[in-house]
Image (spheres, coloured by chain):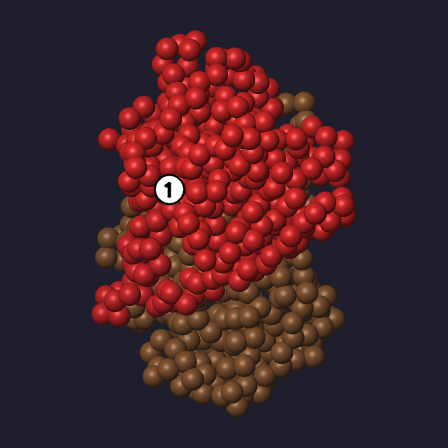
Chain colours: A brown, B red
Amino acid sequence: MALYQKPAAAKVFRDGREFPLEFGGSLPELTVAYETWGELNSSRDNAVLICPAFSAHSHARSHADDPNPGWWEEMIGANRGLDPERFFIICPSLLGSCYGTTGPLSQNPKTGEPYQGDFPEVSIKDITNAHVRLLDGLGISTLYGSVGGSMGGMQTLELAVSHPERVRRVASFSATTHTRAFTSMIRHVGRRAILMDPDFQGGFYGQRPPEKGLRLAREIGTIFYRSREEFNRRFSCRPVDPNRPPKLTENSFDFQNYLDHQAQKIVPIFDVNSYLRLSFAMDLHDLSHGHASLEAALDRIEAELLIVGVTQDRLIPIDEQLDLRDRLLAAGKTVHWREISSEVGHDAFLKEFDALGVLMREFF
Amino acid sequence: MALYQKPAAAKVFRDGREFPLEFGGSLPELTVAYETWGELNSSRDNAVLICPAFSAHSHARSHADDPNPGWWEEMIGANRGLDPERFFIICPSLLGSCYGTTGPLSQNPKTGEPYQGDFPEVSIKDITNAHVRLLDGLGISTLYGSVGGSMGGMQTLELAVSHPERVRRVASFSATTHTRAFTSMIRHVGRRAILMDPDFQGGFYGQRPPEKGLRLAREIGTIFYRSREEFNRRFSCRPVDPNRPPKLTENSFDFQNYLDHQAQKIVPIFDVNSYLRLSFAMDLHDLSHGHASLEAALDRIEAELLIVGVTQDRLIPIDEQLDLRDRLLAAGKTVHWREISSEVGHDAFLKEFDALGVLMREFF
């Protein structure tokens, strides 16, 4: 039994209105799973939206109703990046995900069956619009702030562009204005691994997902989530067992066991149809889409911004984050910039909680 | 019908002696396909060995018996890197390849059938030892020089270490002392793509090779053979057709067509069993293997060396080539070092013939 589902204590917001999609078509209705920490104050101006990364969901931190550690456990708490004593923190699951918000496992009202392979392509803008519907439902007109890393950073930037009146402070870790071809190529070969798996069945795999393809996609991704420096330090370039001839059909190197482990971990927690759609949404990410130009898009931003890049990031390298900063500065925005050095590279937003916590407390 | 076979006019050297392999076992006999340009002089001291790269073979340049352009066509000729008026140039196909030298398509004398999946793992040292058997057969005791790029550079360095008395000058483009974990990871995920293809059949696929897996392996490789700078300049980050909704099961981006094209090109020219073994041989590359240390291995070298690295190389990045240079210098060797800048990155040794030609003429 797959473990991917709505986190145990997530609340559910339902919006029966049609939900139009950026690249055409619409969903007949929208459900958003979300969790909250802290209390909304009487002036309703202390809300902070956490925008989840690719494989994340509403359960960012443990709480009384669900004591399991969250994916941003160490970012939330007293003396951490986001203090629930001060903020009303909201974290929704992503549109297109397998964690309770409308996605490929949701029931298609037209057929009464799960969408599976019929679920449409979604974009970062669509995901952001789903977040905004939730904010409407919660009666929050303007966020104190919004924060996210990687795909979450894309959402928080998109929110600042598409809905400038809805957010006063935006923190983006390891994100970009628009995805470049090189980064898309990496995700593309991961999706290809899934699409070539005979078990994929056009997305209608039911209870038998294309595990080999998903594992290989995750292996490819893992190479870019971390840094070359880390891998070359941690792993030997020599076969593990000097007394056993290396075999290309076996695991002869220690890094192969590491990649296997990373790959195996994702199988029970990520639905393949969701993986494909969220991966593709990142490739389609482009703040300029729907605007006259990237400059025109960025010009709409009203929020103050914190942009954080990681020196060793190989997926969205530091030069793209410097470019994001420079474009925001050129547009006359108030931008705080920090470059941090971390051997875990792109994954720093999931690991470097001390450094990011200080930055968030200063900024918020 | 697959096109992989011995190049049309390649000569064949046969050695009936057992051929021991570095990581155990042996081949009962050895065949080497090779081509030559120019004439061996009377003192037999003007021979130059070209060590082929991963997908290359004996046909480095066109000649009277085979007018098809070779894979190093523009490196060989008057006023080019290697002048056949001056040198006796030899280029063998690689042990383990599908181009006429003993490999998975060769007949296994024990069964009378092609080895296919039974062909053993080979190493850069094994490949180099096969080259040396050919030199023995040609009556060449000491080479004027040896040259290769990427996997060819590994061979030429290995030759200088394993058989120091056989070569006076060694030119290595974009190679390394030993393959690091990060670089191996990239090749590993490519091999995994092949191994997960149901058509692989443990290597006994006969006339129906696992094309999907091979194509995906080549797509992954292509991302690293060139540079991020090139891809981000050449390819749009936006879907090709603004009037058509992007689909994750289709080619929505122009880089996808490019990768498809690169992948499709390799299918008719590379046997999958050869691909796997030569890929694995690069991961196993380690000049120190069989010696007390890397220092002890490099200390054996008698040749003068030209080491060339490419600033934008993403597969064997420039820092590894600087490390190679520094280790050679520390060992007291005569080393000429050049760093060249090329947007084609690791593939510079297959493209930058003007720059490399000048360097080779100066060095040789």
Q: Nearer the viewer, residue B169 or A363?
A: B169
Q: Is residue B347 above or below residue A206?
A: below
Q: Nearer the viewer, residue B8 or A58?
A: B8
Where's the N terminus of chain B, which quadrant? top left
Where does residue A17 sit, x and y in percent of width and height?
A: 31, 71
Question: What residue sits 36% from the left and 75% below the top?
Answer: A289
Q: Is residue B159 above or below residue A196?
A: above
- Is residue A306 visible to us here? yes
Q: Residue furthest front?
A: B42
Q: Nearer the viewer, residue A168 or A217?
A: A217
Q: Chain of mark 1?
A: B
Q: Is residue B132 above or below residue B286?
A: above
Question: What residue sits 56% from the left and 75% below the top?
Answer: A322
Q: Secondary structure at mark 1?
A: loop
Where does residue A100 sit, x and y in percent of width and height?
A: 44, 57
List the residue tagged with mark 1. B61
Where does residue B340 sit, x and y in percent of width and height?
A: 55, 60
Q: How many marks?
A: 1
Q: Is residue A40 above or below residue B292?
A: below
Question: What residue sits 67% from the left and 78% below the top?
Answer: A86
